[in-house]
């Protein structure tokens, strides 16, 4: 059994803005600070602590731009996530389980169950080898998990319902 944790492994989440005032808002990248991913034979068990989210920064043309967000902006984003996004969920107990992992020429793939308590959904995934890491990017539709995407008053600035989750783990041969 191999167990992956930060800093050797990473889990980032990208959220994208929309709405009337989206020009003044930012797409952002978040990082999960505490998680573990266990891979053994054809199974994956992963636990993610959603209370450990940190704001990496604002995105421009798909890249993080240092200094675009103040420390206060970052605190406000995390506070909004805790108060609005996870108001009906237990973010400390997010899990992913896959019992039918398939190894491919370029990586691994399968179907597993993602649970953001109290909601569980099956998701398909594919992780490809990129250099010395396996990289998996999945798009999650927040309403599928009972999550209402953040919206500022009157909906002038909103977060799109689809978010992008990216997990990277080192390759162990």
Image (tube, helix red, strand yellow):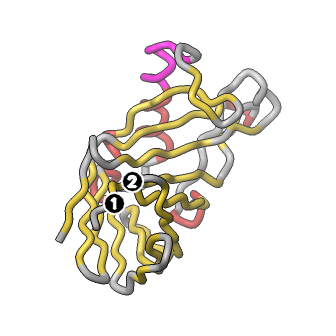
Identified at 43% across, 54% down, the residue is 167
Q: Which label was assigned to residue 171? A: 1
Q: Position of residue 168 (x, y in %)?
A: 41, 53
Q: Which label was assigned to residue 124? A: none
Identified at 69% across, 26% down, the residue is 25
Q: Magenta span covers which residues?
A: 69-76
In contact (CB < 8 Å): disc 1 and disc 2: yes
What residue is pinned by disc 2? Answer: 132
Q: 153 or 31: nearer the eye?
A: 31
Mark 2 element type: loop
70 w.r.t. 98: above or below: above
Q: 14 or 130: nearer the eye?
A: 130
Q: Is residue 80 left or right of residue 47?
A: right
Quadrant position of the C terminus in the picture? bottom left
Identified at 44% across, 74% down, the residue is 108
Quadrant in the rendering for residue 46:
bottom left
Quadrant in the rendering for residue 140:
bottom right
Identified at 48% across, 74% down, the residue is 121
Majority SS type along the magenta span: helix
Mark 1 element type: loop
């Amino acid at each position: 059994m191999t167990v992956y944790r930060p800093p050797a492994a990473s889990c980032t989440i990208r959220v994208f803005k929309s709405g009337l005032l989206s020009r003044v808002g930012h797409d952002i990248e978040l990082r999960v600070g505490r998680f573990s991913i266990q891979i053994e034979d054809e199974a994956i068990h992963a636990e993610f602590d959603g209370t450990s989210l940190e704001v990496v920064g604002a995105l421009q043309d798909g890249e993080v731009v240092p200094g675009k967000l103040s420390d206060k902006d970052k605190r406000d984003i995390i506070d909004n996530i805790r108060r609005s996004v996870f108001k009906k969920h237990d973010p400390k107990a997010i899990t992913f389980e896959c019992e039918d992992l398939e190894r491919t020429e370029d990586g691994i793939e399968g179907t597993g169950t993602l649970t953001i308590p109290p909601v569980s959904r099956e998701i398909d995934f594919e992780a490809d080898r990129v250099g010395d890491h396996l990289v998996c990017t999945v798009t999650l539709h927040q309403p599928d998990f009972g999550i209402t995407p953040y919206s500022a008053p009157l909906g002038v600035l909103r977060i799109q319902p689809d978010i992008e989750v990216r997990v990277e783990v080192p390759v162990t041969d």
